[in-house]
Each structure stands twice: as structure tokens, then as C-alpha cells.
Image (tube, rainbow, N blue to C red):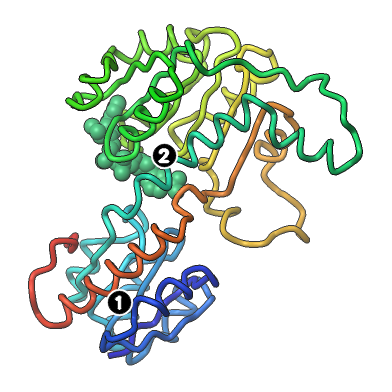
Amino acid sequence: MRMAMFSTKPYDRRGFDAAVDGERIEIDYLDTRLDERTAPLADGAVAICAFVNDDLSAPVLQQLASGGTRIVALRCAGFNNVDLDAATAAGITVVRVPAYSPNAVAEHTIALMLSLNRHIHRAHSRVRDGNFSLDGLVGFDMAGKTAAVIGTGKIGMIVARLLWHLRCEVIAVDPFQDPHLLSLGVSYVDMDEAFRRADIITLNCPLTDDTHHLINAGTLSAMRPGVMIVNTGRGALIDTQAALDRLKSGHLGSLGLDVYEEEGDLFFEDRSDQILADDVFARLLTFPNVLITAHQGFLTTEALTAIAETTLHNVSVVAAGDACDNAIN
Ligand code: NAI
């Protein structure tokens, strides 16, 4: 059975090449993004595999179906780019990878936090440049600081545990209280109290109508001066313009981002020879106390292996006509 895999990067290919051994699936790796123009490349493929920025709108799904595709395998958890009703109408089953490695994202969250605090990104550039001055590189002890974890699900729970090991006072916000965190002494508080008390805030909740622009001009002004915010959840949890204003005023002490509200037009591609058209993003890059990675929280060997194995399993189960737990339509 042929599976056309869109938006393939070298790291995807390594994971899938290793996992496909022994499966009756032949993968056609395509580096192009899926859209109306490129959908015909999947003609004859029973399954296609797509990532977060591939276009799975109704016209694309109809084209895929007319080319013989009946399985769309997302190699990610989110499915906001898929018109599920159109997929069902076209006779296409959509499957996803609901969880791969919460450790990967949690560890990246802590990496951003520690790097920002101790200015590792700036120190590295200085030393490479023969500048061994320490001026401007003063950090703070993590031990004893109050860290607020917003969302203590699979990822946030591990972030909270790691912060506890760093001897932070960990407070958390989540409608569901994790018993293990409670047993460590983590206290659950409401959002206002978390924002008011925290020295460090980490966003590990999903993007919903409730959490859209959770960090905004109003909530930022209630926070402690010098607060650090790290977002490895979803870009639109933060009103970026409001964060920029607070960075300029000095109230927001530092900002670590692995996600950005307008990342769809930027991330995952080499654009180093292009003019950056996004003025907000360009301004963010000028701050010494802002550290941005391009949605790489998930990028570990273990997570890529789990993504490949689950995706291939999903496709095999659906192709065999069996019910798949990871189907979403
Ligand atoms: P999860 O579903 O296990 O946990 C999310 C938690 O957030 C749940 O406990 C839920 O009750 C809580 N929550 C929901 N609404 C809330 C609210 N208004 N206030 C406080 N808590 C709320 O999800 P998981 O796997 O931990 O992922 C968290 C987020 O991380 C994902 O939604 C995704 O946006 C992001 N993510 C980022 C990746 C990256 O590479 N940077 C990779 C994978 C996920």
C-alpha cells in the first residue's frame, strides 16, 4: 500500500524509515506542502501523511478522495487544519498521534527557562566573539522562586515535577488536580492568584476559546515586575503585541517562546535569505531577554520514533478495516 507523505523533513524520514521496516506500507516521501496544487501527487495513494501546516480543507480532501485516498494520517496531535466534516463526506478516515513524548516538550520548556534566566544564548555569542565580560548576564537562583504551571496535563505535570526538583515553590492552574503533584506539595490556585504570585509562568494548556490570549494587557499588568513567561503550548495563548509593550516598559522580565501566533507563515522552513515581513516577530528578535525556538519542543529521537510508529500503526489498522482508537472522524 502506498502512503504519500507531505512536508517531509530529513528528521521525519529517519524516523519513518526505521519504523516502516516489516510494515506493508511503501512511503513516498514528498518535501512539498499539501495544498490544492500538490494534492495530485498523492494520486493512487491509499493513505497520505500530513503535518501541522498542510492544507486539509474541503477542496483538498475532495481531490485526495478522487485520487483514491481514504486515510489521512496526521503525524501530530492537533487537527485544526483538517475539515473533519468534509473528510467524512469524502469517505476519508482521519487518524492522529494524540501523545508522543511529553518529556520532550517538558524538558524543552525547562531548557528555555534556564537559558533565559542565565542568558546562555547571549553568553554563547559573547564567548564565540572573544568577549568574556559578564556584565548583563546576572541570573537568579531558581530555588525558592514561585513557578506557576498553567495546565498540568501530560506535559505540564512533568514541567511541574522538574520545577519541584529545582526546588521552586510550584503553584498550578488546571480544572483537574493531579494527585501526584498534590502529594509533592504543589498547590492549585486560580488564574488570578497564579499570575499575581508567580516569578515564572509556564503555559502548558491547550488553545481554546477560553485560553485564547490568556496573557494579555490586563493579565500582564497584574503580574510581578520582572516576571518570566515561557510558552511551549500554542502561540495564541499570548497576545504578542501586549507582551511586546510590556517588554518595552521593562515590566515583563523575559519571554521564552517555542510557539508564536503567526508561526504558520514562518516556522519549519529555512527563510534566512528572505525579508522578514512580520514586524511583530522582527521586533521580538531585538530583545536580549527574549528567546525563541521554532516549535521544536517535540523534536527528540524518542518523540519522532513514537510519532512514526503510531502513524504507521494507525494506517495499518484503518487499512485492515478495523476500528482505530486514534481516529477522529
Ligand atoms: P493535555 O491534554 O494532556 O493537558 C492539557 C491540560 O490543560 C489538561 O490537564 C487540561 O485540563 C488543562 N487545561 C485546559 N484548559 C485549561 C485552562 N483554561 N486553564 C488551565 N488548564 C487548562 O495536553 P498536553 O499533551 O500536556 O499538551 C499541552 C499543550 O502542549 C498542547 O495543547 C499543545 O498546545 C502543546 N504542545 C506543544 C508541543 C511543542 O512542540 N511545543 C508539542 C505537543 C503539544
Q: Which mark is residue 108?
A: none
Mark 1 sits near ligand 1, with its Cβ under 8 Å away: no
Quadrant in the picture for residue 318? bottom left
Instruction: State how far apart marks 1 and 2 are (Cα).
Output: 38 Å
Percent x, y for residue 198? 45, 12
Percent x, y for residue 121? 71, 37
Q: Which mark is residue 106?
A: 2
Q: What amino acid type is highlighted by mark number 2?
A: Ala
Q: Which SS class for mark 1?
A: helix
Is tag 1's residue or tag 2's residue first in the polypeptide sequence?
1
Of the 4 image quadrants, the one containing the C terminus is: bottom left
Q: Dot 1 surroundings within 10 Å: few (below 14), some, or many (20 or more)?
A: many
Percent x, y for residue 180? 21, 27
Which of label 1 and label 2 is nearer to you? 2
Q: Which SS class for mark 2?
A: helix
Quadrant in the picture for residue 93? bottom left
Residue 209 visible (yes or no): yes
Residue 246 visible (yes or no): no
Q: What amino acid type is highlighted by mark number 1?
A: Gln
Taking the spot 36% from the left edge, 25% from the top edge, the residue there is: 150
Of the 4 image quadrants, the one containing the N terminus is: bottom left
Instruction: Tell me how many marks there are.
Output: 2
Mark 2 sits near ligand 1, with its Cβ under 8 Å away: no
Taking the spot 33% from the left edge, 80% from the top edge, the residue there is: 64
User: Could you tell me if the residues under marks 1 and 2 are in contact, i.e. CB atoms within 8 Å?
Assistant: no
Taking the spot 54% from the left edge, 37% from the top edge, the residue there is: 111
Percent x, y for residue 241? 59, 28
Horizontal side of residue 300 vs 80, given as left or right: right
Say above or below: 148 vs 125: above
Q: Which residue is mark 1?
A: 62
Horizontal side of residue 246 vs 229, given as left or right: right
**Quadrant assignment for ligand 1:** top left
